[in-house]
Amino acid sequence: MSSTIPSLNPFIHGSPPKDESPLERARRKQEEAQAKAISDAIDKQIEQDRIALKTHKRAIKVLLLGQSGSGKSTIVKNFQLRYAHSALVREQSSWKIAIYLNLVRSVTMILDIVDEAMKEQHDRLTDQRRSTSPSRSYQNGIASPPSDNLGLPGGGARDSVFDFSEKHKLLQLRLQPLTRVQSDLERHLSSAFQPEYVGRTVNTAFPCLAAESPKLSRHHTKFSEEIHDTTEILYSCVSDIKQLCADDIVQQVLKGTKPPLERFSRSFMEDIDRLMSRDYKPSDEDIVKARVRTTGVQEHHFRINRGQGDEDWILHDVGGSWAPQSTWRPYYFDDIDSIIFLAPMDCFDQRSEENPTVNRLENTIISWKHICNCKLLTNVQLILLLTKVDLLKEKLESGVRFDKYVLSYGGRANDVLSITSYLRRHFKTILQKSGSQRVFHCYLTSAIDTNVVHTIQSAVLRDAKTL
Ligand SMILES: Nc1nc2c(ncn2[C@@H]2O[C@H](COP(=O)(O)OP(=O)(O)OP(=O)(O)O)[C@@H](O)[C@H]2O)c(=O)[nH]1
Ligand SMILES: [Mg+2]
């Protein structure tokens, strides 16, 4: 007897005809089997959706907010390191490409800066020659005054004279292929997949890895071959990159440049021999330091057991040029338990990427104000992370003064403790002025520090009874 009962099968109606031929019977059996497979698949999907919905309902949902580069994805990576290490391992080869891209971008940036300094110097020398040339002075009837700064009016962008030589021009020439390497690596990480995956993606920094369509995997294979050629070009440039970075004159040029090279790039450059070995696999620390801009909203699920049963956590990482009115808003305000707001403190002397007329710290304060005043978020717990404390310390130690950029800071001490206390008070006052009854949770952290996970967990669970 067949195990499929036709009357219970939603796809088959009635009992089999009495005069059914063997061929018809076989066809009917096949159709029934297909119908059952479809029905089972639907049941399975319904069950999975039910479990997912239940998990989602009971999960602790956290929204990470902060300007581009503030460290949201770095926090997610630290959670992955601790609770979903296999996800990071699965993405290891993509992180390798990202790390190479970070490195190559830094080198091309140095080349651009050197190129600009060379041109400036060339123009300056040409002007000087013209202004001191007797024939020209007589010709114009103007005697140029002697100049102590190579004739640059008002000191110009650069006051120093750099002793560039043929060696620098040669290095520039030999490193030219890096422009192509950069665009190939960029293409690999983003372009081909981007339009299809902008939006909400789950548990991956690289939406392309989540794709299973044959079209995309064919593309992936083709690209792996291309990437092989690209990395070969990169390997062939290593000794020139090292020469460029070790060069005294290049170092002098970089010293006077703003913005300085980002710290992660510097540390990748210092480690170039390890990174460029042919069997290089990114370490966890490399992955945490690597910079890949997030596109759209990424959702990361973690099942965490800290000795008192399982907890489901969902972290929403809102990437890109975040602004209060942008993408996250329609989705999350009524469904989120906590907002982790990242305020990087080292950015007080930088301009906002989103709006270059605004200071980055000021931009962060404006966003915080907006969140505190948002009526729709009244019941959402707010946690402020004052981040990049390590970079703030480094910057202050290098002699940059906070009060030069934040006038209201007055004549207070230019040290980490005084500045962080000042900022903490400032953010707290904004929350209080908004009329909110929420507790002010504020922590000093570095997103690259693995302890940030524990800080977030304790902060979120501190108000757990209200979740
Ligand atoms: N030294 C140091 N570096 C940090 C810290 N937080 C983040 N970074 C680095 O800053 C870079 C940017 O961090 P991300 O986590 O990619 O920033 P994001 O907020 O996700 O940026 P978008 O995806 O553009 O929105 C990375 O290279 C991090 O390693 C920190 O506290 N200290
Ligand atoms: Mg990000």
Image (cartoon, grey):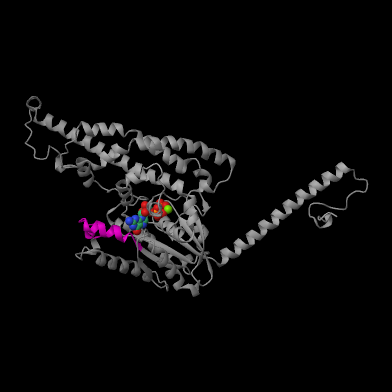
* Magenta span of residues: 386-406
Residue 344 vertical placement versus 150 (above, below): below
Location of residue 95 in the rendering, given as x and y in whole percent from the top left corner: 43, 48
Location of residue 86 in the rendering, given as x and y in whole percent from the top left corner: 50, 55
Residue at image coords 67%, 58%: 46
Location of residue 109 in the rendering, given as x and y in whole percent from the top left corner: 31, 41
Residue at image coords 68%, 57%: 44
Does residue 322 appear in the picture of this structure? no
Residue 148 vertical placement versus 68 (above, below): above
Does residue 305 appear in the picture of this structure? yes
Where, by quadrant of the figure, is residue 243 drawn?
Answer: top left
Tell me if residue 20 is in the magenta stretch.
no
Q: Which one is in front, 148 or 303?
A: 303
Tell me if residue 398 is in the magenta stretch.
yes
Q: Which one is in front, 298 or 103?
A: 103
Q: Which one is in front, 17 or 61?
A: 17
Residue at image coords 27%, 48%: 260
**Image quarter in which the N terminus is found:** bottom right
